[in-house]
Every structure is written in structure tokens, then in C-alpha cells.
Amino acid sequence: MRAVVTRVSEASVTVDGKITGQIGRGFLVLLGIAGTDTEAQADKISDRICGLRVFEDENGKMNLSPEKAGAEILVVSQFTLYADCTSRRPGFTKAAGPVIAEPLYERCMEKCRERGFKVESGEFGADMKVSSVNDGPVTLLLDTDEL
């Protein structure tokens, strides 16, 4: 499982002109799921996202967890994170199909909610327009194969 986690001052996702998810200060998470991913990996990446200490403390140091910073989380499914770019036309055979990916996507969000976070989302499988105001910028790449 892969995630691109961006610290934002605000972010939103729109489908067919309607906002489906919107947050203030927090994380915009683009989440990619491979065909071999499991619930254990969903739990692992959710735990890591919820514990990333990248919000500034009173001394201006990136030291606060999202919980202590009062962060919110916007999660957007992003199958293209598993693109094979060895040719000029990317292939997506490593990305999970909806039967595997959607329940794991939902599980990731539920795990964050269980930790007390406000979690918003896009619409799985839809053509989405994502807007964000990056804060820092701080952007991190997570991969469960490397955690």
C-alpha cells in the first residue's frame, strides 16, 4: 500500500461539481492499493499516517502529531500510485481492482476515525478534482513494503 501524505492548510475533493470531502488543517492522503495488499497493511499505513509528527510545535519544530495539532484527514483513492512507468504509456496491472481496493480504502479511513480524527473522502472510482493548499510544503511518501 502506498500513500502520498501532504500537510495542508485546507483541501477538498469535488465530483461532478459537488464537494464530497473538505478539510481545514491536516493531511491530504492520496492512497494507492496493490492487488496483493491486505487488511494488516491497511492498518499499518493508517497507524503511520495518524502518528506522523510533522506539525510545528511552539518552537517552530516539526514535532507535533496530527492529534496534538487538531488535524483533519482527507483520503483520496489513487490507483495511479501503482503505475508501471517503464514505458511511456504507464500500465496499472499492479493496482488492485475495486473488489480488493475499495474495502481496504474504507478500512484505512475507519482506522483513522477510530483514533478520533475527522476523516473526509473522495468517491472511490470517480473522476475527482482535488484542490489543496500545501503547508510547508511537507509531502511524504509511505509504502508498507518499507515500513
Image: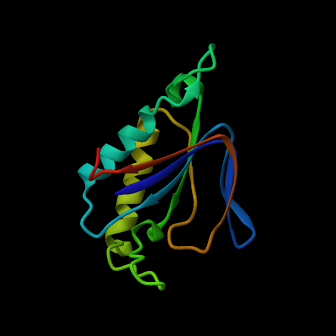
Q: Position of residue 17 (x, y in %)?
A: 75, 69
Q: Position of residue 19 (x, y in %)?
A: 71, 60
Q: How is the image coloured?
A: rainbow
Task: Give the vertical position of 92 relative to 141 (above or below).
Answer: below
Number of numbered discs on residues: 0
Say which quarter of the image contains residue 93: bottom left
Residue, x 32% and y 74% (percent of image)? 94
Viewer-closest of 25 and 3: 3
Residue, x 30% and y 51% (percent of image)? 144
Residue, x 37% and y 63% (percent of image)? 33
Q: Position of residue 64 (x, y in %)?
A: 52, 23
Q: Could you tell me which quadrant the C terminus lies in?
A: top left
Residue, x 36% and y 38% (percent of image)? 47
Left or right of residue 24: residue 26: left
Task: Give the vertical position of 56 relative to 8 (above or below).
Answer: above
Q: Could you tell me which quadrant the N terminus lies in?
A: bottom left
Task: Give the vertical position of 92 relative to 51 (above or below).
Answer: below
Q: Position of residue 140 (x, y in %)?
A: 49, 45
Which residue reaches farthest top?
A: 59
Which residue reaches farthest right?
A: 17
